[in-house]
Amino acid sequence: MKFILKHCHLEKEYTDCIIVGIFESLQLSRSANYLDSSSNGYITSLLKLGDIKGNIGETIMFYNIPNVTAQRVLLIGLGKKNTITQSNLNLIIKKTITFLKKTSIKNFICSLDEINIENNHHTYWLIRTIVLGIQSSLYQISKINQTTKKHINFDLITLNILKKNDLYLGEIALKHALAINLGITSTKNISNLPPNICTPLYLSNQAKKLADKYSDNIVVDVIDIKEMKKLKMNAYIAVGGSSKNQPFMSVIKYSGNNNINNITIALVGKGVTFDSGGISIKPSTNMHEMKYDMSGAAAVYGTLIMAAELQLPLKIIGILSGCENILSSNAFRPGDVLKTMSGKTVEILNTDAEGRLVLCDTLTYVERFSPNLVIDIATLTGACVVALGECVSGFFANDEELSKQLQHASKETDDKIWRLPLLKEYETNLYSSIADLSNIGNSKAGAITAACFLSNFTKQYKWAHLDIAGTAWESGKDKGSTGRPVELLCQFLLNQSKISY
């Protein structure tokens, strides 16, 4: 499938279909109005039949329009004019692609360039959102060992740019969108794999392949359990050491040319490729979804792909903290006390609170790179899902500027996050009579106490924590990875690169 940008003469374009918009109260968009004028009011005459009102996502197809070369024109409802959000636009694109999938159309022109997105009144954001929306709507999970693959796809998608002066900006948007989509799709693909395939070793091998593909910018080191023992990463080892699939921590070092702000950014992803809960075993219902407990690592993996594709002028350390939390005779136990890499001791009260144990040693390990800022991404707590549901990721930060930067990227991408407090009052819940910390608090504010636990290991740098337990995947008939928060992280890095529009 190929995307191109073009300043089109719509009535003269040879294509299977032209997509134009209609607002509420039957107000045609500029492109639709242009085609209506070219056809001497043919579209307007059909609208009088009342088959469409212009509500968001409504569709109607017209055929053989007089004086228009295209075989079809699809009219899509845009809702109220000048009130379209990115969420609305994503829904419009999804409805459009859903409709087109049912046809024989192989190429089309999308002429929605006149839409103004709330908060992002810019051709760059419109093109980027449309391209990402189309790609997202076409994504399909690949079935294991499927002999024939049936992918609904298009050959050519042309994005009409009404103003020639906006073509350059559109090209940048398209370039960024394709790189971000590659990162999102890679994240989804690896997250959706079954846990007997996507083991910690598999995850590390995927990281090593990045060094082969992007050899000019990426170097990968893989830390195995022997090296972890030398590093005294006892908390990490306790979680992953009981599985036959031994832990591997992948360290992806990305170096772009002309590092624009001379800082080092670290992205740390929880990569528990399957989480049984250990001795504190999870209920069997939906336990199969615990293959998604490596979604944080997958998000870091996808984000590094975007950075390499665009050759961002940054220095980034991406760490995939891969392991498997399995019940066995070697499993760590409630009541155990572990000495972490930092020297702090932790009393284990619940072996299902394992992600913070993996991350605390990783967050200590990352100090050797002298990072200026660190963001960890983890499907960390069910409590975050209880607090924020499945639409919004929780986040915490020990630095106000970093917090503002993440919130800004969130608003730009419509990947919603909500800041929760890191207050000393919550630290008392982590009291242990036998160790420096316990690995869980009481039954209240679980997402916050988990973040407070991690904060004890992040004193050397600016740090933020994204809890994506509610947003990393969907259940039910649409089950699968969402690819979040890859676009948010990509936008954060673009902003750090001084590339914003």
Image (cartoon, rainbow, N blue to C red):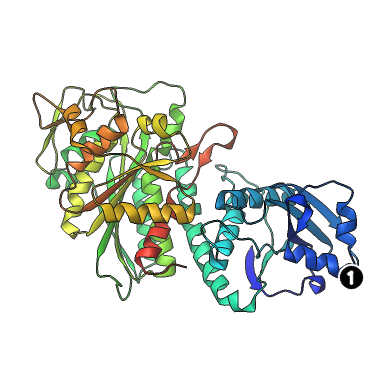
The x and y percentages for residue 42 are 90, 61
Picture quarter containing residue 277? Answer: top left
- Residue at horizontal 85 percent and vertical 56 percent from the top: 62
Above/below status of 253 relative to 339:
below
Question: Is residue 206 in sight in this rendering?
Answer: no
* Amino acid type at mark 1: Asn
- Residue at horizontal 21 percent and vertical 31 percent from the top: 426
Above/below status of 368 relative to 282:
below
Q: Quadrant of the N terminus?
A: bottom right
The x and y percentages for residue 491 are 42, 59
- Residue at horizontal 58 percent and vertical 37 percent from the top: 478
The answer to whether 430 appears left or right of 113 in the picture is left
The answer to whether 165 appears left or right of 104 in the picture is left
Question: Is residue 469 in sight in this rendering?
Answer: yes
The x and y percentages for residue 61 are 82, 53
Above/below status of 382 relative to 473:
above
Between 211 and 166, the residue placed more toward the observer is 166
The answer to whether 216 appears left or right of 227 in the picture is right
The answer to whether 77 appears left or right of 393 in the picture is right
Picture quarter containing residue 114? Answer: bottom right
Disc 1, SS: loop
Between 427 and 259, the residue placed more toward the observer is 427
Picture quarter containing residue 207? Answer: bottom left
Residue highlighted by disc 1? 67
- Residue at horizontal 58 percent and vertical 62 percent from the top: 126
Count of labels in the image = 1
The x and y percentages for residue 377 are 34, 46
Between 211 and 159, the residue placed more toward the observer is 159
- Residue placed furthest toward the bottom: 165
Neighbour class for label 1 at 10 Å: few (<14), some, many (≥20)?
A: some
